[in-house]
Structure formats: C-alpha cells, structure tokens
Amino acid sequence: KAGVTQTPRYLIKTRGQQVTLSCSPISGHRSVSWYQQTPGQGLQFLFEYFSETQRNKGNFPGRFSGRQFSNSRSEMNVSTLELGDSALYLCASSFVGGSEAFFGQGTRLTVV
Amino acid sequence: AQSVTQLGSHVSVSEGALVLLRCNYSSSVPPYLFWYVQYPNQGLQLLLKYTTGATLVKGINGFEAEFKKSETSFHLTKPSAHMSDAAEYFCAVRLNTGTASKLTFGTGTRLQVTL
C-alpha cells in the first residue's frame, strides 16, 4: 500500500510569490491534515480536511489556505510568501474514526 | 485544550544503554497519545500509540511506552540503544473525540547515540 505522497519535495520561492503544495493520502483515508515544522516554532497544526470540508484550523494568517478534492487529495496554498514561511510542510492522512495519522515525507519550502 | 511537554531537548546515550525520553501531557478529556520519530529531511514515522486498554504499549524497533494517568506521563523507553536510533522524537496528544485529527506535538527530543 502506498504511503502519503507529497509533491514537490523541495521548493525555492521568492518573497511575495505564492506556492501550492500537494498531498495524496493513503488509499481509503479521507481525512487530511497539514502541519508546519520550523526550528523556532516546532510542529504546528495548519488545518484539517474531511470530505472536501475544512473542519479544523490552526492559528495561521489567511495567507495560508487549503482545499480537498473528491478523491481526498489535498492542496495547500500560501500567498504573498514571507521569509518566515520557510519550513518543512507535512501532510498526514487518517481513516475516519482512526486513531493515528500517517505522515508524508514533507515539502521543504525555502523563501528567499 | 491539550498540551505536551518533553523534558530534555537533547539526550545522549551510549550504544547498548537504556533510552528514556520523557513526555508529560495535559488534556481535559482522555487523550490518545503517540510517539513519532523523525530522521533528517524525512517525515514523521509512528513508533507507537496509546488509545485505550493496556497502559504499556509496544512499538516498532524495540520501543515501548507506559501511560500513567496519575502522573500524566507517557515516557518512551528502549532497553538497549542502537546507533540507528539516533533521530528526533516527538510526543503528541490528540483528543479522543472521534471527530477531529488535530495533533498537538511536544518540542521534540534529539537522541544522540555514541559508541
């Protein structure tokens, strides 16, 4: 069974640009969550999607958004990039009612 | 609201020695508890989890953890460290609500294993 797939693995963007990251969950998983990992703030929850609906959101500015498609694949978008958005972005998927989340390898975003 | 505290951002042990990584949690309702491991430039891999039932849970790679409600702790142990155990370890808590999957993580403990 394939794991959680995140693309791309690495990205370099310039301040002010926008970026879209993609996540394909494990087959059969309908819940997808996103996390930001930085050395200073650690692992922070961004948002969670289930059945194409955002059902939980972390404390991030509106520049961070996401969506989920009918096949459960998810994308997150960051607009007007800032240097502080440089981070490892992790996606996790889980079964409905399941207890654990399975993580992808992450997308390393560098903003210059 | 829930929170996780990991004592010790950096732990160093000799190969073959006991590994003990500490985690304390705070939760208003019975929690689900997890330990994840992260190798450099990788995602998070689930080591073990506690949901309900037996308080001593065994995970992969010889790790285990014990849920102690009275101490609000979920410490991770391994009897004998191996060089391949060098990585960063994260304790996480999730509310047992059945509706949402939000994980709250500790700040992580970097485990160094020396010869």
Image (cartoon, rainbow, N blue to C red):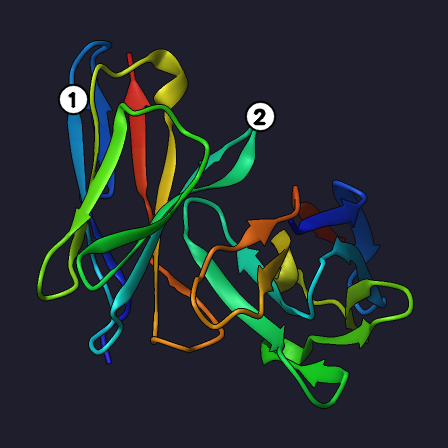
Residue carrying label 2: A40
At 48% from the left edge and 64% from the top edge, which residue is drawn? B45
Q: Residue at x 82, y 55 (%)?
A: B13
Query: Where on the picture, by quarter, is residue A107?
Result: top left
Chain of the residue displaying label 2: A
Few, some or many residues within 10 Å of mark 1 (<14, 14–19, 20+): some
Q: How far separated are the C-alphas under marks 1 and 2?
A: 23 Å
Dot 2: few (<14), some (14–19), or many (≥20) neighbours within 10 Å?
Answer: few
Q: Secondary structure at mark 1?
A: loop
Q: Answer left or right for B92 relative to B64.
A: left
Q: Is residue A79 above or below residue B20?
A: above
Q: Is residue A104 left or right of residue B37?
A: left
Given the current orientation, which residue lies at the most extreme right position? B70
Image coordinates for residue A111, horizontal then vertical, percent: 29, 17
- Residue B75 at x, y percent in the picture: 79, 65
Which of the pair B67/B102 is nearer the observer? Answer: B102
**Chain letter of disc 1?**
A
Residue at 20%, 76% in the rendered image: A27
Quick one: A110 or A96, which is closer to the camera? A96
Kindly indicate the quadrant of the structure image that contains residue B34: bottom right
Q: Residue B85, position in %: x, y?
A: 64, 62
Mark 1 vs mark 2: in front = 1
Note whether residue A52 is visible: yes
Q: What is the tally of numbered marks visible in this picture? A: 2
- Looking at this view, is B23 or A12 the one in front? B23
Q: Amino acid at mark 2?
A: Gly
x and y, in percent, of residue A71 in the image? 10, 66
Q: Is residue A105 visible?
A: no
Q: Secondary structure at mark 2?
A: loop
In the rendered image of this protein, does residue A66 appear above or below residue A32? above
Q: For the C terminus of chain B, give its image quadrant.
A: bottom right
